[in-house]
């Protein structure tokens, strides 16, 4: 099975337009940042199930993203959270834009809507 096949199958099984929109935005990327490794690539998205509360009970409306994340992970891809990364405008690689520890420093620059990873900044 390829990631493209898994995503295509997920699109067919998705029960909501919100999840289908998430699936349409999936693109495999590379990490630009030292210390973040993925031999095959990383998919960035909102991997949460689509849920809502009904009469005090959490109801899952669509679990497609969680199921796809499990499949891609078994295929040795990394699935990470899109709201924690920026995409370099020059090379298309992902670099962390939100801290994940106390000593974190951004490996790149975000300025006026422009995103440039540290590797591309070094090349300037």
Image (spheres, rainbow, N blue to C red):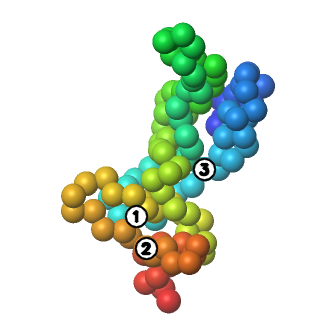
* Quarter placement of the N terminus: top right
Q: Is residue 123 visible?
A: yes
Question: Could you tell me which residue is drawn at 64 percent across and 22 percent down?
Answer: 62
37 up-or-down from 121: above or below: above
List the single residue furthest toward the left.
Answer: 103
Residue 65 image-quadrant placement: top right
Q: Is residue 41 visible?
A: no
Element on which disc 2 rests:
strand
Rendering coords of residue 36 (x, y %): 37, 55
- Circle 3 sits on which residue? 28
Residue 114 image-quadrant placement: bottom right
Question: Could you tell me which residue is drawn at 70 percent across and 35 percent down?
Answer: 18
Q: Is residue 97 left or right of residue 3?
A: left
Q: CA distance from mark 2 to mark 1?
A: 9 Å
**Tag 3: Cα neighbours inside 10 Å, few (<14), some, or many (≥20)?**
some
Give the mark, 2 or 1, whose residue is nearer the N terminus: 1
- Residue contact at pointers 2 and 1, CB within 8 angstroms: yes
Of residue 77 and residue 89, the one placed in the foreground of this image is 89
Give the mark, 1 or 3, whose residue is nearer the N terminus: 3
93 up-or-down from 8: above or below: below
Of residue 88 and residue 31, the one placed in the foreground of this image is 88
Q: Which mark is residue 108?
A: 2
Question: Could you tell me which residue is drawn at 36 percent across and 68 percent down?
Answer: 106
Residue 52 image-quadrant placement: top right
Q: CA distance from mark 1 to mark 3?
A: 16 Å
17 up-or-down from 100: above or below: above
- Circle 1 sits on which residue? 33
């Amino acid at each position: 099975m390829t990631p493209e096949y898994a995503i295509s199958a997920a699109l067919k099984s998705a029960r909501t337009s919100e999840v289908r929109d998430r699936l349409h935005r999936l693109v495999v990327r590379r990490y630009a940042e030292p210390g973040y490794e993925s031999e095959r690539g990383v998919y960035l998205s909102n991997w949460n199930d689509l849920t809502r509360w009904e009469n005090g009970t959490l109801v899952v409306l669509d679990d497609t993203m969680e199921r796809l994340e499990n499949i891609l992970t078994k295929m040795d891809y990394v699935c990470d959270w899109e709201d924690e990364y920026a995409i370099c405008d020059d090379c298309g690689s992902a670099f962390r834009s939100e801290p994940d520890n106390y000593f974190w420093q951004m490996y790149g620059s975000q300025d006026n809507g422009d995103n440039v990873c540290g590797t591309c900044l070094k090349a300037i």
